[in-house]
């Protein structure tokens, strides 16, 4: 039975551990090895139509919005089409400019979020083409859109989204490859990303097996009333989603900041009471991210790190969770997993209702 806890203490923990299988399900049958591309069958667009889009605008709410930001980066990186994500709840109210050569993408686990559904209608009313990235088959948004990608995460019960988000990230990567391969992405680069995608299920299992430091990190975070999550470029949406998770289920205030912006204001808040979670991918900004960590420590701020194995964090001497390296474009998907586990253990340690946080609903069907 899908609605069974299957031996786990909470649905959130069960769903966290379902991620390797869920990730395999969203990829299955959608890879075209020979041509280094993906075959997403439900887009309802010919390669020529897919090629004609000049921009991409991704719309979602809450965690779906943050994973949309990851998706926009993947699309810019792999397809070289200007892309951005916006909160659907804002977009629908601000008389947005709708263009026929922009590809709109609505992202929603439930497919029932009213703000996102209205954003879809607003785009369509003004002649725009909308794809859905949706989990629940036959949901309101899935039926309304012009084409789409089901993420096949299976039923998600916990209010805090985990496996659906991971699968949304993977779906965006696959869409980015398909958009890229009708443009300038080479067969070799397409194959590089496909290999990275196929490694993700096993790597998620590895992250979960190595997530023991998450308990100590959670214990550190619950000492304060507030925390920073910092990351830059590809690490920034990871920080936003990490902060969102902590807020949703532990009720600890958490704010995501670009590590580069720390010195332009929030550094003033750092003291013994203000912990920071730093996301440090093994990329060209690793040294700068480490320097931001040093600045936090210099002001006596507790620091914890989520980093790739290639990042030398030894000088910081702080609790660290290691995440396996993948292709740079795909790294945010795996870097997000420890933030789920940290939030889970924080809420657990505080004795809170992990699966049903106060004031929140799994899908917000009201305006
Ligand atoms: C609610 C939940 C969030 C979720 C958002 C979007 O606000 O509290 O956790 O991310 O809805 O849900 P959706 O079903 O559209 O992905």
Image (tube, helix red, strand yellow):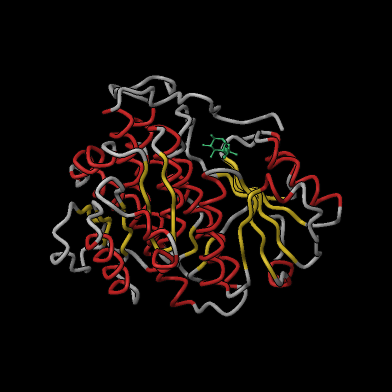
Position of 47 compared to 351: left or right?
Answer: right
Residue at figure coordinates x 36%, y 67% from the top left: 327
Residue 15 in view (yes/no) = yes
Q: Quadrant of the N terminus?
A: top left
Nearer the observer, 64 or 182: 64
Residue 188 found in image quarter: bottom left
Q: Residue at x 72, y 69 (%)?
A: 53
Of 166 and 46, which appears nearest the observer? Answer: 166
Residue displayed at 80% across by 61% down: 97
In this view, 38 is above or below 152: below
Is residue 329 visible in the rendered image? The answer is no
Picture layout, residue 145 above or below residue 31: above
Query: Quadrant location of residue 193?
Result: bottom left
In the image, taking residue 162 as reference, residue 301 lies left or right, namely left
Q: Indicate the position of residue 111 as horizontal and vertical percent values.
A: 63, 37
Q: Quadrant of ligand 1?
A: top right
Using the image as rendered, state which of residue 273 and residue 290 is in the foreground: 273
Left or right? Give the position of 41 relative to 4.
right
Position above or below: 161 against 354? below
Q: Is residue 96 left or right of residue 264?
A: right
The quadrant in which the C terminus is found is: top right
Farthest residue in the right direction?
126
Coordinates of residue 150 in the picture (x, y in percent): 58, 44
Q: Compared with residue 214, is residue 366 higher up or lower down, i.e. above or below?
A: above
């Amino acid at each position: 039975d899908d609605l069974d806890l299957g031996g786990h203490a909470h649905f959130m923990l069960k769903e966290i551990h379902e991620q390797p299988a869920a990730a395999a399900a969203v990829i299955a049958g959608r890879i075209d090895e020979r041509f280094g591309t993906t075959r997403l069958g439900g887009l309802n667009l010919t390669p020529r139509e897919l090629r004609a889009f000049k921009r991409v605008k991704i719309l979602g709410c809450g965690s779906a919005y943050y994973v949309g930001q990851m998706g926009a980066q993947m699309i810019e990186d792999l397809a070289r089409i200007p892309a951005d994500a916006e909160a659907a709840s804002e977009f629908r109210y601000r008389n947005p400019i709708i263009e026929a050569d922009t590809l709109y993408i609505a992202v929603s686990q439930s497919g029932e979020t009213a703000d996102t559904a209205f954003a879809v209608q607003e785009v369509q009313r003004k002649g725009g083409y909308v794809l859905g990235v949706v989990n629940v088959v036959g949901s309101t948004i899935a039926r309304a859109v012009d084409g789409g990608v089901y993420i096949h995460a299976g039923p998600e019960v916990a209010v805090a989204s985990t496996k659906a988000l991971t699968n949304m990230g993977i779906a965006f990567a696959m869409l980015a490859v398909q958009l890229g391969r009708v443009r300038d992405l080479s067969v070799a680069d397409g194959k590089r990303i496909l290999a990275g995608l196929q490694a993700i299920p096993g790597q998620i299992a590895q992250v979960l097996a190595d997530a023991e430091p998450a308990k100590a990190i959670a214990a550190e975070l619950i000492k304060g009333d507030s925390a920073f999550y910092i990351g830059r470029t590809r690490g920034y949406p990871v920080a936003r989603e990490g902060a969102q998770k902590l807020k949703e289920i532990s009720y600890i205030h958490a704010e995501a900041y670009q590590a580069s912006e720390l010195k332009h204001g929030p550094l003033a808040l750092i003291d013994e009471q203000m912990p920071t979670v730093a996301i440090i991918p093994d990329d060209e900004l690793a040294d700068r991210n480490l320097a931001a960590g040093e600045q936090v420590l210099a002001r006596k701020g507790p620091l914890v790190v989520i980093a790739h194995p290639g990042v030398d964090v030894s000088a910081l001497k702080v609790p660290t969770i290691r995440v396996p390296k993948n292709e740079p474009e795909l790294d945010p998907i795996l870097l997000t997993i420890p933030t789920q586990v940290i939030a889970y253990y924080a809420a657990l340690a505080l004795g809170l209702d992990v699966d049903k946080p106060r004031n929140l609903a799994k899908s917000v069907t009201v305006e």
